[in-house]
Image (spheres, helix red, strand yellow):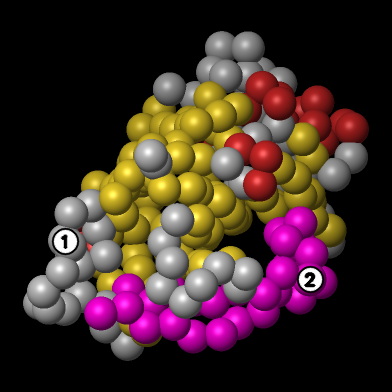
């Protein structure tokens, strides 16, 4: 059984690229009911997907985006634990909200995109939150600058409002979390820029044919 709740995106959202876009939260509820329990594979819509980041810069914030290079997503609506997510980000084309920050971000003291052109994430476990069935906790491993560390992300699944209730052909996966720059050796300008980088991934996916 799948339950839907109504929600909206406002102009304060980091991902207001979904302008005036209403969505319905797809609530993950594990049940032992009859039905097709086979996991479903999805392909990524790169043009409609975004990965945003934010880090403190003195009293201000540096914000920006990392293009999504590829994603492999499998969703099991009967047994959520069988779902999996793998995402590769194109770090070489990362952009910050002002030119110097973009140059520093791509340079050898931070992401060193010449040597390490991608960031990758692979999920290892997905659990629905018992007190919030519309949300899940996704554990996995993230690789930055050829260093792999464990990470836990919050996960939510959305259905575009122009789609029929219960339709699964097009969905939106939102993942959010944070990483320490120092944990991956990306320590440049640590006297000016904070260590904790917030990440917000919005992936639009289509059911594979």
Q: Nearer the viewer, mark 1 or mark 2?
A: 1
Where residue 103 sits: x, y (%)? 80, 26
Label 1 or label 2, whichever comes before in sequence order: 2
**Residue at image location 76% in from the left, 56% down from the top:** 17
| Start-end of magenta stretch | 1-28
Which is more toward the observer, 108 or 5? 5
Name the residue carrying label 2: 20
Q: CA distance from mark 1 to mark 2?
A: 34 Å
Q: Is residue 22 magenta?
A: yes
SS for tag 2? loop
Where residue 114 sits: x, y (%)? 63, 12
Q: In this rendering, is residue 53 above or below 15?
A: above
**Residue at image location 57% in from the left, 41% down from the top:** 45
Rendered-image quadrant of the N terminus? bottom left
Where residue 102 sits: x, y (%)? 80, 32
**Residue at image location 43% in from the left, 67% down from the top:** 167
Is residue 188 something one can see in this rendering?
Answer: no
Name the residue carrying label 1: 37
**Residue at image location 88% in from the left, 32% down from the top:** 100
Q: Few, some or many C-alpha atoms within 10 Å of disc 1 (few <14, some 14-19, many ≥20)?
A: few
Q: Residue furthest top?
A: 115
């Amino acid at each position: 059984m799948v339950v839907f709740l109504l929600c909206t995106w406002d102009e304060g959202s980091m991902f207001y690229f979904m302008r005036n876009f209403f969505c319905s939260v797809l609530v993950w509820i594990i049940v032992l009911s009859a039905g097709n329990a086979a996991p479903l594979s999805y392909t990524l819509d790169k043009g409609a997907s975004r990965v945003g980041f934010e880090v403190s810069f003195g009293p201000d914030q540096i914000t920006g985006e990392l293009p999504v290079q590829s994603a492999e997503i499998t969703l099991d609506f009967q047994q959520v634990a069988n779902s999996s997510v793998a995402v590769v980000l194109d770090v070489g084309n990362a952009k910050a909200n002002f030119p110097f920050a973009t140059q520093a971000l791509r340079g050898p003291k931070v992401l060193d995109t010449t040597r390490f052109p991608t960031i990758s994430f692979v999920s290892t476990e997905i659990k629905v939150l018992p007190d919030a069935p519309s949300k899940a906790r996704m554990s996995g491993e993230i690789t930055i600058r050829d260093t792999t560390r464990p990470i836990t992300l919050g996960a939510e699944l959305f259905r575009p409002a122009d789609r029929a209730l219960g339709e699964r052909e097009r969905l939106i996966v939102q993942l959010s979390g944070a990483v320490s720059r120092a944990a991956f050796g990306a320590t440049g300008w640590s006297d000016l820029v904070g260590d904790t980088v917030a990440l917000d991934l919005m992936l639009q996916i289509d059911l594979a044919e």
